[in-house]
Image (spheres, coloured by chain):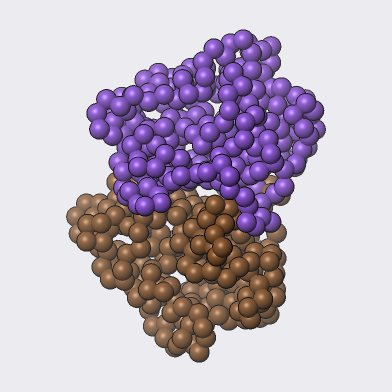
Chain colours: A brown, B purple
């Protein structure tokens, strides 16, 4: 994160209700990769609109299918609340630009509390990788780096062992481990965690260097309210086949508690084709 | 699977188009658990309608949010095709009963081919657990077992080590490994794989015995056309916290190839509450 980051995450995901269930928002040009808005960032905008419309505020589960990337600029979000239950609500949200659908998402919302404790945990990976101070900041052009412009908005750090792809020598493990901080050091909340699960570069970069790896589907679960401070991220590829790859992402807060997890299916163009 | 299974999976997921994008279907009483239709079974019905409506036939990614369980009996499915691209289509589908929304799902569809090979695989688990012959059939009342009626429709087998919960002594690992076959020994296809990822009992039964574990969200990726024969299944719990659990499911075909994978977030009521 550099001096370039003058706005907060809440600023760049702000939605304005112009009619019941209809919102305007702005896909900011600084939150793009190769000119295309980041998918998790768009999901946070959709989540902000769903959260405003539903009886429950905290996103528990979000699923998005990506139809086409909007250009940076104004977008609209339409929300339909499907059910308002006692402990959870469900809503559908569609992001359009010039009346063309770009992202279709669904949300299950509820109330997360800060004081829950894991009852049982064994199947998810343990927090791993170097501590924050041992990781290397990834920056965009404003920070003197080679990353996309979005990297100048955030504090994204990857442990040096997992950055070998930057020297043209991916390790082949398909794993990226590091940390993420928001503009201005703001604390995470359920909406910004929807961005966190898609903030890291494709884990496929640690396997094979390719062009854009466009997300087809992204599902995120928010498991707890995060403690203050940057979050620890593990982003890993699982299977590349038939021109598609699935990735899993795990996010822990500063207490080492799993606060969000996600899977995504993305397209990947290999040469020679897979 | 017993003599009770007189219909095929294609029969019980059949959809009939009564107007463009509007379908009728039947939630069969035999495909229920405690009187509620299985969530993966309902997703296969939704997928059948989406597949009929879209320009591409094979489900690549499916995401569903479960609002309320329909009763066994007639249901309606409404499909809206959101995009028809060159290599993929996206569609939204809603299952209603008596005009009340029960399941909202999205699909990305494309063309799967039988001859793809993994380009890279490391992050997903390897096929594990005993072979088909070493696993124990789980049956419902018609088969003389204690399982729900749906177990009399399918050939579901779990390795004996993972069935300790049936003797009141769950291992605490939260993992169920076994095999699944369809009625009449029919081969799997992308639609029946949507059922396969939700066919096993909750993996939480290997941790703590509870009541119903209702699915809130289920996301499935179909990675390849499966080879003939039963499929191998690994179903595992990851984190129980705040009255919710996430589970991951991996499905391999008889060649040992990963053909489907899924995550789900479900509610779980613990005593004492988590």
Q: Left or right? Give the position of B242 relative to A71.
A: right
Q: From this viewpoint, is residue A39 visible?
A: yes
Q: Going 32% across and 57% down the picture, which residue do you hit?
A: A102
Residue B34 in the image: above or below residue B4: below
Q: Left or right? Give the position of B174 relative to B214.
A: right
Residue A9 in the image: above or below residue A79: below
Pick whichever, A13 or B134, lies toward us. Answer: B134
Q: Going 22% across and 61% down the picture, which residue do you hit?
A: A98
Q: Going 57% across and 31% down the picture, which residue do you hit?
A: B188
- Write down the quadrant of residue B51 in the picture: top left
Q: Quadrant of the N terminus of chain B?
A: top right
Location of residue A129 in the rendering, given as x and y in whole percent from the top left corner? 70, 69
Q: From this viewpoint, is residue B237 visible?
A: no
Pick whichever, B33 or A229, lies toward us. Answer: B33
Location of residue A251 in the rendering, given as x and y in whole percent from the top left corner? 58, 62
Location of residue B135 in the rendering, given as x and y in whole percent from the top left corner? 76, 27
Q: Going 41% across and 32% down the picture, which residue do you hit?
A: B48
Location of residue A52 in the rendering, given as x and y in whole percent from the top left corner? 33, 55
Pick whichever, A77 or A242, lies toward us. Answer: A242
Q: How many marks?
A: 0
Q: Quadrant of the C terminus of chain B?
A: top right
Q: Left or right? Give the position of B63 relative to A160.
A: left
């Amino acid at each position: 994160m550099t001096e370039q980051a003058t706005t907060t995450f809440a600023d760049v995901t702000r939605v304005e209700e112009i009619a019941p269930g209809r919102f305007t928002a702005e896909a900011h040009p600084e939150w793009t990769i190769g000119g295309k808005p980041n998918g998790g960032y768009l999901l946070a905008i959709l989540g902000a609109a769903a959260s405003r419309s539903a009886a429950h505020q905290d996103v528990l589960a979000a699923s998005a299918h990506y139809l086409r990337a909007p250009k940076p600029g104004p977008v609209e979000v339409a929300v339909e609340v499907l059910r308002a239950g006692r402990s959870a609500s469900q809503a559908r949200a569609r992001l359009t630009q010039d009346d063309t659908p770009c992202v279709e998402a669904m949300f299950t919302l509820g109330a997360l509390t800060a004081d829950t404790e894991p009852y049982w945990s064994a199947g998810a990976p343990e927090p791993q990788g170097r501590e924050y101070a041992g990781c290397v900041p990834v920056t965009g052009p404003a920070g003197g780096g080679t990353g996309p412009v979005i990297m100048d908005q955030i504090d994204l750090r990857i442990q040096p062992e997992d950055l070998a792809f930057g020297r043209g020598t991916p390790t082949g493990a398909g794993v990226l481990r590091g940390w993420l901080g928001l503009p201005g050091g703001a604390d995470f909340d359920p909406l910004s965690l929807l961005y966190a699960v898609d903030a890291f570069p494709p884990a496929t970069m640690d396997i094979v260097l390719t062009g854009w790896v466009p997300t087809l589907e992204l599902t995120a679960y928010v498991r707890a309210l995060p403690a203050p401070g940057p979050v620890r991220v593990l982003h890993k590829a699982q299977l590349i086949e038939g021109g598609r790859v699935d990735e899993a992402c795990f996010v822990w807060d500063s207490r080492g508690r799993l606060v969000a997890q996600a899977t995504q299916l993305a397209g990947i163009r290999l040469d020679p084709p897979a």
